[in-house]
Structures are given as structure tokens and as C-alpha cells.
Image (cartoon, helix red, strand yellow):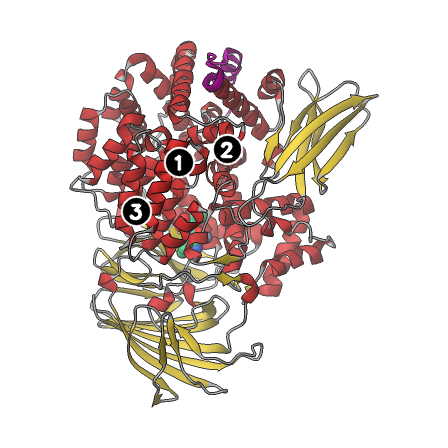
Amino acid sequence: MKDASPQTIYLKDYKPFGYVVDDVHLTFKLVPNSTRVVSKITFSPNPDATDRQFRLHGEQLKLISAKINGSDVSPVMLDDGLMVDAPNETFVWEAEVEIAPEANTALEGLYMSNGMYCTQCEAEGFRKITYYPDRPDVMSVFTVRIESDLPVLLSNGNPVAQGEGWAEWHDPWPKPAYLFALVAGDLVNHPDRFVTQSGKDVELNIWVRPGDENKCAFGMEALKASMRWDEEVYGREYDLDIFNIVAVDDFNMGAMENKGLNIFNSSCVLASPETSTDANFERIEAIIAHEYFHNWTGNRITCRDWFQLCLKEGLTVYRDSQFTSDMRSAPVKRISDVIELRGRQFPEDQGPLSHPVRPESFQEINNFYTATVYEKGAEVIGMLKLLVGDDAYAKALDMYFDRHDGQACTIEDWLKVFEDATGRDLSQFKRWYSQSGTPRLAVSEKFEDGTYTLTFKQHTPPTPGQDVKEPQVLPIAVGLLAQDGTEVTPTTVLEMTEAEQSFEFSGLDAKPIPSILRGFSAPVVLERTTSREENLFLLEHDTDPFNRWEASRTLAREGLIAMITDGVGSDTLWLNALKTAVADSTLDPAYRALLLSLPTQSELAQTLFEQGVTPDPMAIWTATDTLREDMAKSWADILPALVEETKVIETFKPDAEQSGKRALAASVLAMQTRLDGGAVAKAQFETADNMTLQLSALTCLIQADAAEDALKSFYDQWKDDRLVMDKWFGLQVAAAKPADAAKRAKTLTEHFDFDWKNPNRFRAVFGGLAMNHAGFHNADGSGYALLADWLIKLDAKNPQTTARMCTAFQTWKRYDADRQAKMRACLTRISETKGLSRDTTEMVSRLLG
Ligand code: BES
Ligand code: ZN
């Protein structure tokens, strides 16, 4: 068990470790509940450190023996490791420990999943494998020997030698312990090769359980595309003879970038048309790229300490989004990212869990792999690039790789290369890393004597621990349109640095219509009371695809808010304008599908809350449902043409073109279902030859209350496929009517196939519940209570996944007194659980404030 008494770690307390590690030799004798790990590590005094205390991290280890320079020593045993007197010169530390991978349900350290051994060491899991200075600024070369009867034995780096029952690996690149990995199992591979820019031949493998080998081809193509892209766009080549990916069924996260041996949640790598949706394919492509890109941004250049997490994660998310934009459609990717940012990061930044992109303290680092570190961290890089320009960005990145290869770095190092490459002073820009909260940007305009003036005011509301906010540097991309829709001023980036600032555009014939924050050039909330006419105009004419979409989204949001608060009907002017855009076959179907997506119910709740109205989840659900109904009825005449247009006759391909068509087709099917009660959906369900079509039909049938047979036959068809069964579990809850969601979730937890210790299955049901806004917030509190019961149960087995799922409660202060009291009671009940993990203790206490 981890130490439950919370200890807070501060960025300002950073001190280098007293020793450097010259090399590491590890021997693993794999046995399910009595694995022996023998370590032989050479340490030398660190000239950059003053404190020579020799203290190693270690958790849940049984120490068998410890030696320094060949002589037995008796370390002082601590809660989180050990301490021993060590020489002030180079010495060899040897230890043997015993661990129990089969009993490890936390899925951190060395554990077992379906008979296969695997590891997850980021952030602080290596200390559950052996005693070690488990911190990212201690880097070393590793040699690993694995002894096991299992046929496939893998670790980082290149294979050195192997024999009957053993294998040896050597990783020549110094790395922190969090990038260590080991896999042993009865696995089969999907092999391929890649020749790098400089002609180096690299062996590629995707390792899976027998039976899954036909689900690897797509991931392999994505890997090769990522390798090529990183060479072409960032000039970065792969640096080992072999690159292995392994699929694991039990995994807390999506995937992990261990050097030369990436480990993936099987849901993020295995794909086939029959079992994976287009969204799955797109996610797999992105995550394979993300983990591969870490080889340079994360592994070759790593983090000095975990406060610098955004150094690798923000940058790598930014890089993987550039990759997806290049492989697919840039506007569609940008809009999807902003939907995600508003759906996940904004609520976090506006609630009790708000924290800076670079936090200054934590209790459990696993709780800081957040939307803020990842998504806002990526937005910050996008802003930096917009401010300095593409060429300077490329120059700064080259400088970053040259200067810091092989080092463990900080945000200061990162910003310094931009300062050196551009001569800019980035001290104010640095506030993006230290100031939490979402800035709000108000806009007013003036037109006089041919000069158009835009005045902006920025303001960031207080967040936990930060009452006073300073102005941020905001790149505001603006374009100006004439009344006839032509662009009179193309996109210009205004650089706002003051709390209030005006920008002038002169030489204009008439008052223009502004298109502000094009491409969502800064992660802020734009507070602008744009008239309905102006938004309708932008929906029709804006040349910036993001803002065109944004105009419609704003109209949808304002229309829904009016329906909720004033009881008015749907905005027919907007519905008609949108209908024209959606019927416009010159527009990308994927883009039209996004135009059709409504603001989420959670987003509407947040908007109401900001306007001082207590959100009623059921009223929000009803308004959304009414709008969908009106949309279906008033668009009935364009549906047949859309059905024709979105038919895919070619062989299935999960590319942007086909998946765009299928996304639009799914929206059309949802409208048809409202008109025909599910007849077309039923037919589609029965004839579908790919999971995208099958699942979109099933969703419609659930929403039409006509899914009973389909759910049964889906189960019979897919009961042996774990990943598809996750969809079956999740969808029933996520798409359920509000009154049924918690009941359905409860029933599913009693299902024979509900393996709650598997994070994917647990997340399917409870992630589905949390996503069902009105269902989760059902007035009787049954959604809250059910989730709390299960979080308490899961915490004893898997603290990391439990703590992450506590975020379902992060918006609790938005709601009415009764719901607040019910949620507070659940959080309190969780917090009072005996033996609660450090992870969940920290989350719940922050949530309670
Ligand atoms: N390094 C992380 C994986 C990780 C996260 C390990 C938290 C330990 C704790 C990996 O690179 C990552 O960021 N994975 C993401 C997916 C990615 C596409 C954003 C994930 O697992 O969700
Ligand atoms: Zn990452």
C-alpha cells in the first residue's frame, strides 16, 4: 500500500540527486507471485549536487539482499524506500528483491494481464520493480536479462543474445527509469520494416495475443507514416535497430512511450473494419503517432521533474495534432480539438481541480496527467508558433533538439530556445505555464472615418490558490468581411498583452463584419454579444472554416439557452441557414457532420451557470431533444439526397473521405429514426458490414427505444471480442434515456461479463454514465451513489483509474442545492473510506475544496 498520509511535493524544492547512474544491469526471474529482480547498478557522485544522501525509492518490494562493492549492507527501511551509507566515490550497488506481478491489480510496476507479464513505469512505477532513484533527471543505459519459459521476451533497446528460457536486451540511449519496459508472453507478431532517411533499416513489430494478428495492419501503417512524418516535418529519425509495440488488455491509460518498446492498451492499437469504428481508427493513428513522437520529445529530451510534464506531453500532443491535420483534414481536426478542449479542459480549469499547465505542487503525480497539462499545454505551443511564425518555430525546435539532446529539461529551457531563436522576450508569455483558469475576452467595436477599431478586455476569474491574475499574451487572429461576404482584411494576428487594448484597421469603405479568434487562436472564452444576424452572416460567408462552424455553434447554444430559460421554440432562421450549409455538397461531409453537432448538455449547463441560472439537467435534455426533433422534421426533404451522397460503395477504408461520409450519414440516420421510429436503422443494423455502421444504427435504435433485439443479437455476435463488448456495455448507458441510465448501469454491473478490474470495462460503464449528463444528474441521486459505490470498490484494487474517474464530480458546484448536497455526500463518503489510496484521497479533497 502506498503511504496514505498525504505529503505535498513542491516545484520550488527541486534538488538534483546526489549520484549519477553510470549503468544498470537487471535480471528478471519471472514467476507469477515470486518474481526475483536482481539489480547491479554503478553510481558515481554527482558533481552538480551538494547533498550526498544515498536514498533509493522502493514500494511493495521484499528485500532479499543488498550489497555495496560486494559487501552486504543493512539499509534503513523507509515508507517509500531505503537509505544507506554510501561511499563518496564510484561504487556498485547490488540488490535482490521479490515482487508479486500476479497480485498487482494497480497495473503499475510489473503486472500480469491474461498470462502475459508487462510493465507500466511512468510516472513512479519503477520503484515497484526494484530500489532505484526513480526520478526523470536520473538517466542511465540499461542492460536487461529476462528468464522465463514464455516464448516472447522483450525489453528496451536492441536484442543482444537469447537462448532457451532467456533473452538479453541492451538500450544504448541513457533514459530515466520511467521509460523502462519489459514484456513476456505467448505473443505473435505482425512484422514490417522501415528504412530511415539516412538509410538505416529498422525492424518493426506489433505483438499481440494469438487471434489478434489480423488487427495489426492499420496500426503498422500508422507507425510507418509517423516515422516518415517526423523525418519530413521535424527532421527526426529513429535511433534503434528495432521498434516494438505490444498490445495489452489491462492498461490504465491509452499507451506508453517506453524506449523502443511502446506498450498499448489493446483498444488503442487493434483495429479491423468489423470491430472498430472510424473514430477508433482515427484515435489509433493519432496515439501510435503520439507515442512514436515521444521518442524525441520525451525520451531523447526528457523532463527534469514531473512538474515539467507538459514539456513532453503538451509538445507531443501538439505534434500528433499536426500529424493528424496533415493526414486528414486540418479544419476538421481543429474543430474536434476545440470541442474536446471545451468539453474536458474548460470544466477542469473552471472548477475545483483547476491548476496551471505547469503545476507547482502535487501529492500524487498520476493525478496531473490532465486535460490542462495535455490539451492546454498543446494550445500554448500553438499560440507560441502563431506568435513567432512557422520559420522561427522550426528554427527554435532545431535548436531545442541540438542543445538538449540527452538532457532532462524544464519549461525554462524550452522557452529559452524560442527567445534565442527570435530575440523575443517571453517572460509575459510564460504566464501561460503558471496561471490557471480560462481567460475571458470581451470585445467592443467602433467605426469612424473609415477606421474600424476593435477593443479587447481580458480577465481571468480566480481559481483555487490564485486570486489575482495578470494579463496574458493573447494571439487574436482576426479577419474582416464586407457586407457582400468578400474578405476585406485577411487573417491578421493581433498580439494582445494588456488588460485592455485596441487595434485599428484603417482605409475601409464601410463598417466591416469581424471574424474574431479565427482558428480558435487562443484558449479563451470569447464574450461577445454578436447579434444573431451577424452570426447568421458568418455561418454563410466566413472564409475561416473554424469560425464558420463557431458561428453555427454559437447560434445553437444561444437558441438552446433561450428554449431552456424562456420556453421559446427552436430558432428556425438558424435551422434554415444550417440546412443550406449541410445540404451543400461542395463542403466536406466530415465538416458538415461537425456543423450538425450540438453543444453538449454539459456545456449548456456551464453556460447557464455562468449566466447565473441554476442548470436543470432534465430541462437541458428536453430542449436538446426538442431541437433535434424540429431539425429532423424541417429537414425531411433534404435527407434522401444526403443518404445518396453519403453512401460508400467502395471497399471499406477508414480514411478521412469515407469516415467523413459515414459521420454525416450517422447524423442523417438519427434524423430518419426520429421520423420512422427506427425502420431504416434496423435495416442498417442487420446488413452493416463494418462497426461504424453497425454501432450508429444501434445508437439510433437505443434512442428510439427499439433496441432490445438488436442488443441481444449484438451480444451474441460479439461476446468473445473484449473490445467490441466494451462498446456494448458503454453505449447502453451513454445513450440511455435519463431516467434509465443509472438503472441500466447498475444492471450491467451485475452482468456475467462485467469484469470490473479491467479498466476498459469499468470505464465503459461508468464513463458512459458520466457522459449521460441528465442520466448521471438524475434528481434522485442514483447516478451519483452508484458511481461512488463502485469508486470505493475499485480504489482498493486500482487507485489510478479510480482517481481519474472521480473527475465525473468536478462540476458539482454548478447544480442546485439538492444535487450539490447529494454529490458532496458521495464525495465525503469516498473520502471517509478506510485505507483510501493517496491518489483518490488527493482528488476527493481537491474536489471538496
Ligand atoms: N506518457 C503517456 C502515458 C502515461 C500517462 C503514463 C499517465 C503514465 C501515466 C502517453 O504518452 C500518453 O500521453 N498517452 C495518452 C494518449 C495520448 C494520445 C494523449 C493516454 O494514454 O491517454
Ligand atoms: Zn504522451
Residue at label 2? 332
- Gap between marks 1 and 3 measured at Cα: 18 Å
Neighbour class for label 3 at 10 Å: few (<14), some, many (≥20)? many
- Gap between marks 2 and 1 measured at Cα: 37 Å
Say which of marks 1 and 3 sits in front: 1
In the image, 288 versus 735, the foreground residue is 735
Q: Can residue 804 be seen in this view?
A: yes
Say which of marks 3 and 2 sits in front: 3
- Quadrant in which residue 142 is drawn: bottom left
* Image spot of residue 327 (x, y percent): 49, 40
Q: Which amino acid does label 1 sit on?
A: Gln
Horizontally, residue 401 falls left or right of residue 104, namely: right
Q: Which amino acid does label 2 sit on?
A: Val
Does the magenta run of residues contain 52?
no
Q: Earlier in the sequence, mark 2 or mark 1?
A: 2
Please give the range of residues in magenta.
Answer: 563-587
